[in-house]
Image: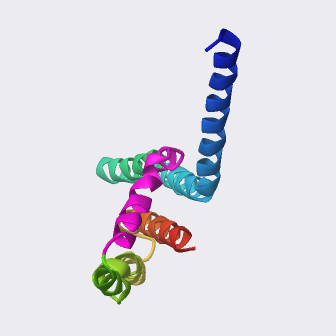
Amino acid sequence: MSKTKFGHYLKFVVFQNLAEHKKTMRRFTLFTLLYLAAGVCLTVFALQHLDMTPNVKTILLVDAGLLYLFAVFTTFPFWHQFAQQSQARLSDKPAWQKNFVAMPTAVNYAPWFLIVSVVVSAISNVMSHPWATETTVSVSLGLPIILLSVENLFVRNQIHQ
């Protein structure tokens, strides 16, 4: 292969990989922004309230750090490839197993159950102890769980379409 043909081939491969990566990033830009926004809100809340104990601030900042980490992960292809591969493995199974998985099972309802249980728990905490910092911490711990579950549902919906 001549040097110019190799150069054109290399450019083609690089630009093709960049185009595929851009498609992947566009798909999860919304979740990247959601993770970043939630992380920024928790960081601001932890740093502006001076009356919090150091343990509460640490919990809020660690939770915000997890959200920032998830925001970075959503820009990489491996983040959603796991969900796509697991859905592909399910579609390769025999018909009776596909029908079993298509039926209402715990696996299909797990993200919904997590979302509802976290929201109900947060509402009960806020109703019993309004404006308490401990309530804010317990509610903030549910943010990554809710966002991860919603992202899982979104990926599953994209695969089924």
Residue depicted at 47% across the width and 72% down the height? 153
Query: Hey, which residue is sitting farthest top in the picture?
Result: 3
Q: Is residue 139 above or below residue 2?
A: below
Per the rendered image, the range of residues in magenta is: 70-93
User: Residue 92: x and y, percent?
Assistant: 36, 69
Task: Looking at this view, name the residue that lies furthest to the bottom.
Answer: 103
Residue 161 place in picture, x, y as percent: 58, 73
Residue at horizontal 44 percent and vertical 61 percent from the top: 84
Colour mapping used in the image: rainbow
Is 10 located above or below residue 100 in the figure? above
Q: Is residue 102 visible?
A: yes
Residue 85 painted magenta: yes
Main secondary structure type of the part rendered in magenta: helix
Using residue 26 as the reference point, say whether residue 119 is left or right of it.
left
Report how many numbered discs are placed on residues in the image. 0
Taking the magenta stretch, the answer to whether it contains residue 39 is no
Q: Establish if 78 lies above or below 140.
A: above
Task: Depth check: give the residue in front, 62 or 92.
Answer: 92
| Residue 116 position by quadrant | bottom left
Question: Which percent across, then down, holds residue 51?
Answer: 41, 53
Q: Quadrant of residue 158?
A: bottom right
| Residue 136 is at least partly visible in this image | no
Q: Residue at x 39, y 59 (%)?
A: 85
Q: In the rendering, at what x and y percent does residue 152 appear? A: 45, 67
In front of the other: 50 or 87? 87
